[in-house]
Image (cartoon, rainbow, N blue to C red):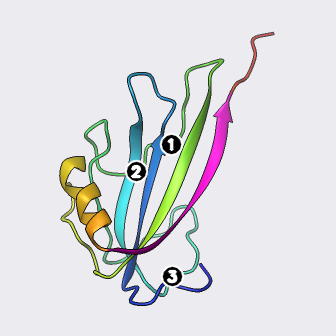
Amino acid sequence: MVGHAAGTRSFAIVMDDPDASGGAKVHWVIAGIDGTVNELVEGARLDGTVEGLTTGKKAGYAPPCPPKGEKHRYRFSIYALDHPAPFQNGAALKDSLPAIAEHTVGRGRITGNFGGEQAR
């Protein structure tokens, strides 16, 4: 995360699947990632972070898992925030997403494509 936005105190990540049936599904909401962090590695324990509920009403990361034969996009949006952690652990989407939006001073996104395997 080179070139942090001015006023960045922490980062938040929202991962969603815009191609899910019935509308976009949120797979992860995390905030409070220290503003000096410049990489995340699998299994890392990040002090001071909070996780909001997903569309499935669970806190934590739900990995990409599109239905067999379907190709879905998964968007990882990162937000630079002017607040250390703008919501509480277990916050509902109706609370966490507006709190992130209210404190955003910069953002970026990467999209990955998953699935699409054909039956043989």
Majority secondary structure in the magenta region: strand
Q: In which quarter of the image is residue 66?
A: top right
State which quadrant residue 49 falls in. Answer: bottom left
Q: Please say whether residue 28 is visible from this viewpoint.
A: yes
**Point 61% across, 19% down: residue:** 68
The label number, if any, that marks residue 28 in the structure image:
2
- x and y percentages locating residue 21 in the rendered image: 44, 22
Tell me the SS state at disc 3: loop
Q: Where does the magenta region start and end?
A: 104-115
Q: Is residue 92 visible?
A: no
Labels 2 and 3 touching (C-beta < 8 A): no
Q: Name the residue under label 3.
A: 37
In which quadrant is the N terminus drawn?
bottom right
Mark with earlier residue (2, 3): 2
Question: Is residue 80 one of those drawn in magenta?
Answer: no
- Rendering coords of residue 9 (x, y %): 36, 86
Distance between the alpha carbons at the discs numbered 3 and 1: 22 Å
